Image: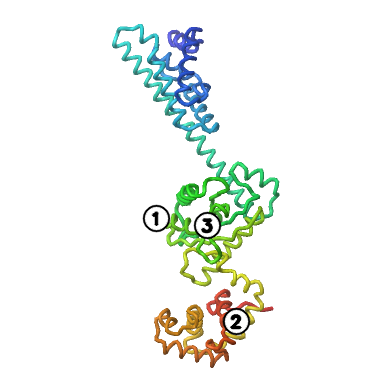
């Protein structure tokens, strides 16, 4: 017991001044090797190595815990894991090269025992350092993810305090005075790993657009991308949107979630413009589902006419009811006749192309058009009637009629 106590006391004793100066020189040189990492992150690591070489002592739990805390400090200071590990390995190499206990000994067994003891310390210390670093990084990522999720929620809601949002957005590189647009990606089925999808999107979007003024997050099962409009190469009206195509191309490479649908809101300036673009993207996703469109990338601009129709829902309900409900008297219901009208208008009134799209004969198309005229009194071939019929067909799509009952117009 007395010998054990004396060994502990000797280990806890301060190194002599000459050794302290030597260890300080080793630490300074190792810090330079690691690109200027603070020498304070070494803590008592070098005295542990020197003591292990001289006495064979293994580091105690408290000493290793202190190394773990240094790993956490390195992560919190934003120092890369590689540079911190390089600091520890470089300092061990430099210490071993000039270790007085080894240099003075000609006994190979002594050198071998000292090397084994030093390697044990390096193993334990570097593993504990890396573990502390990883724990701190996980905590930082969780904290940042929570802050990012809260920021995204408040930005998309659009009713938070502007001053507070500007302050919270700054660490994420967001300039809320710029023109932004929001894009949403909806998977066909629930994603088992949303982090993988976010990482994939971040990699390609940051590579293309940079990491300033860009946020990627999740909200209510959707992937959300907030990006500056001028950086996305937003195409002129009527063209496919670059941001949407970029997102869809990357997401389709993932194993899960396919087929994806991406909706992009229009660019708008300022804080409230972000919330507006988000609402447009949500409406575009909903509308694309109602319209059963086969487009994988939809834009709010492309669906403006449907938004206009929905602004006066009682009026559009009256229009559909007055013009199209007589089609329910047709044998087989109104659906085939509505599909025929939709195809006819989409092809510019060309019966042969309509027939090809519907996989029926031209005679069937003309028969159905005549039947529609008989039941409704509106002739799709007559330019004076065409607009009314086409508006009613668009309204039926918006209201999902006849699959759903028309809402009350009052």
Q: Quadrant of residue 378?
A: bottom right
Mark toward the start of the polypeptide (3 vs 1): 3
* Residue 222's disc number: 3
**Relative height, residue 1 to residue 72 (above, below):** above
The residue sitting at the front extreme is 236
Q: CA distance from mark 2 to mark 3?
A: 32 Å
Q: CA distance from mark 2 to mark 1?
A: 42 Å
Q: How many marks?
A: 3
Give coordinates of residue 374: x percent, y percent. 54, 93
Q: CA distance from mark 3 to mark 1?
A: 17 Å
Q: Which residue is mark 2?
A: 320
Mark toward the start of the polypeptide (2 vs 3): 3
Residue in the image at 46% along x and 83% along y:
350
Crowding at dot 2, Cα within 10 Å, few <14 / some 14-19 / many 20+, comes out as many
Q: Which residue is mark 1?
A: 255
Mark toward the start of the polypeptide (2 vs 1): 1
**Relative height, residue 401 to residue 144 (above, below):** below
Give coordinates of residue 52: x percent, y percent. 40, 15
Residue in the image at 67% along x and 56% along y:
272
Tag 1 secondary structure: loop
Tag 2 secondary structure: helix
Residue closer to the observer: 160 or 355 = 355
**Relative height, residue 86 to residue 390 (above, below):** above
* Image quarter (top left, top right, bottom left or bottom right) of the N terminus: top left
* Image quarter (top left, top right, bottom left or bottom right) of the C terminus: bottom right
Residue in the image at 39% along x and 9% along y:
100
């Amino acid at each position: 017991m007395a010998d054990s106590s004396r060994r502990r006391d000797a280990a806890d004793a301060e190194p002599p001044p000459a050794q302290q100066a030597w260890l300080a020189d080793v630490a300074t040189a190792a810090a330079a090797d690691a690109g200027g990492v603070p020498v304070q992150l070494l803590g008592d690591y070098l005295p542990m190595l020197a003591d292990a070489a001289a006495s064979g002592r293994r580091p105690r739990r408290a000493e290793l815990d202190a190394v773990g805390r240094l790993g956490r400090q390195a992560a919190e200071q934003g120092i890369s894991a590689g540079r911190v590990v390089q600091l520890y390995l470089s300092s061990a190499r430099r210490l071993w090269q000039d270790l007085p206990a080894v240099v003075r000994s000609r006994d190979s067994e002594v050198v071998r025992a000292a090397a084994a003891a030093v390697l044990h310390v390096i193993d334990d210390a570097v593993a504990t350092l890396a573990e502390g670093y990883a724990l701190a990084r996980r905590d930082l990522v969780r904290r940042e993810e929570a802050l990012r999720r809260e920021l995204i929620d408040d930005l998309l809601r659009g009713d938070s305090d502007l001053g507070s949002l500007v302050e919270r957005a700054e660490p994420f590189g967001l300039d809320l005075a710029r023109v932004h647009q929001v894009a949403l990606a909806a998977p066909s089925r629930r994603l088992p790993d949303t982090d993988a999808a976010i990482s994939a999107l971040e990699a390609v979007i940051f590579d293309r657009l940079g990491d300033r003024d860009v946020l990627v997050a999740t909200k209510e099962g959707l992937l959300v991308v907030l990006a500056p409009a001028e950086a996305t190469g937003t195409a002129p009206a009527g063209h496919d949107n670059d941001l949407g195509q970029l997102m869809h191309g990357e997401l389709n490479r993932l194993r899960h979630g396919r087929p994806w649908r991406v909706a992009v809101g229009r660019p708008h300036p300022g804080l409230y413009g972000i919330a507006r673009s988000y609402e447009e993207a949500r409406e575009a996703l909903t509308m694309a589902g109602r319209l059963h469109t086969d487009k994988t990338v939809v834009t709010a601009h492309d669906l403006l006419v449907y938004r206009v129709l929905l602004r006066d829902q009682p009026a559009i309900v009256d229009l559909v009811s007055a013009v199209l409900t007589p089609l329910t008297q047709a044998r087989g219901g109104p659906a085939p006749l509505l599909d025929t009208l939709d195809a006819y208008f989409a092809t510019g009134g060309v019966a042969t192309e309509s027939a090809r799209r519907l996989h029926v004969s031209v005679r069937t198309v003309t028969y159905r058009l005549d039947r529609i005229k008989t039941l409704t009194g509106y002739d799709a071939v007559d330019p004076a009637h065409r607009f009314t019929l086409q508006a009613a067909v668009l309204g039926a799509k918006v209201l999902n009629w006849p699959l759903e009952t028309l809402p009350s117009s009052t």
